[in-house]
Amino acid sequence: MKTRVTELLGIKYPVIQGGMAWVATHELASAVSEAGGLGIIGAGGAPASWVREQVQAAKAETDKPFGVNLMLMNPEADDIAQILIDEGVRVVTTGAGNPAKYMKAWKEAGIHVMPVVGSVALAKLMERGGADAVIAEGMESGGHIGVETTMTLVPQVVDAVEIPVIAAGGIADGRGFAASIMLGAEAVQMGTRFVVATESTVHENYKEKIIKAKDIDSEVTGSTHGHPIRVLRNKMTREYIKKEKEGATFEELEVMTLGALRNAVVDGDVVNGSVMAGQSAAMVKRQESCADIIADVMDGAKKLIPAYFED
Ligand code: TUI
């Protein structure tokens, strides 16, 4: 199927892998790109030098297009923004902020820019600023989230902008893909299902925690201080939410979460660490290759919306 997104990005399937901090390394990104989707390296909170190495590694692994997600709260965001230009990265997604100050330089470098938005207002602003597409992400997602749901956000963003809209949040199979197309999206972004891909370097404990998760096993921490983060429930979230209810300050709570994502992803501490995952964790049943994940999503959607695949 040809869509504006597959044409723009030069990819086979309109499936984008979320640029998850610590999780979306070059191994995962190049595997997704090799499988015909768009792999994304997640800069997260990493140093600029790490991002450069990751981009170089991905280039060595695949000739296919891949992208980088710049998490805008990264203290080295300015340096990373420039490295993406220097390294000739073709696609950039952004998260956790407004990328307006980088847009002009990225566009001049011929980069396709696709900011993640959680509201109609930011989507419009991004379109005016020259974005090539927007990723409308609902609060079903893992990690740092907005407040709107995918079901309501996507059609509103579709109505508000002319550029293609990519749906994200709660999508993990062909049903979610088909539903996204019904809502007017032209591609999907999936994170949680790719966390457990065989090519993902995430610790086995983290993958197992996602595979075992049930529908009600995620929790949103940090809402009281304006930084809502969806994670799977564990000892850390129970303590965090207790402290949050007791009125702890942002700084007190921050101490509990600093480095917690790394501890879970890299060291496998899924008891005290931060196991970020979306509500779709309960729909993720097993480890599979990125190619099998994309094939399953496409096959599932084809049964539901065959006309979409007729060209
Ligand atoms: O960025 C994400 N998800 C993330 S980033 C992340 S790393 C992290 N670790 C610890 C603490 C905080 C972050 C984990 N998960 N998703 C994309 C996304 N962007 N969701 C919501 C937004 C967003 C939020 C506010 C985009 C823009 C925005 O404000 C724009 C403005 O006007 O400032």
Image (tube, rainbow, N blue to C red):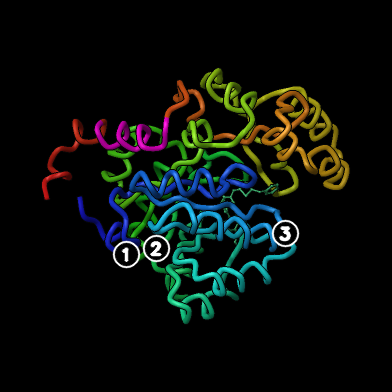
Q: Is residue 291 magenta?
A: yes
**Could you tell which of marks 2 and 1 lies nearer the N-terminus?**
1
| Spatial CA span between label 2 and label 1 | 9 Å
The boundaries of the magenta stretch are: 289-299
Q: Is mark 2 within 8 Å of ligand 1?
A: no
Q: Which residue is mark 1?
A: 8
Q: Position of residue 266 (x, y in %)?
A: 70, 36
Badge 3 amino acid: Pro
Which callout, 2 or 1, points to the residue nearer the camera?
1
Residue type indicated by callout 1: Leu
Under mark 2, the amino acid is: Ala
The span from disc 3 to disc 1 (Cα, nearest Å) is: 29 Å
Q: Is 112 colored magenta in this rendering? A: no
Instruction: Examine the rendered structure and indicate whether residue 201 appears above or below residue 184.
Output: above
User: Which comes sooner in the sequence, label 3 or label 1?
Assistant: 1
In the displayed structure, does residue 86 sit left or right of residue 251?
left
Relative side of 239 to 145, left or right: right
Give the residue number, with chain letter if any, for mark 3.
Answer: 47
What is the distance, in whole Å, between disc 3 and disc 2 at their CAs?
27 Å
- On screen, 221 above or below 78? above
Tag 3, which secondary structure? loop
**Residue at point 61%, 25% (across, down):** 204
Within-10-Å neighbours for mark 3: few <14, some 14–19, many 20+: some
Q: Is residue 207 above or below residue 56?
A: above
Q: Earlier in the sequence, mark 3 or mark 2?
A: 3
Residue at image point 28% right, 45% down: 181
Q: Disc 2 designates what residue?
A: 133
In this picture, residue 136 sits left or right of residue 79: left
**Residue sitting at the far front:** 60
Q: Is residue 240 left or right of residue 104?
A: right
| Circle 2: element type | loop
**Residue 44 % position (x, y):** 65, 52
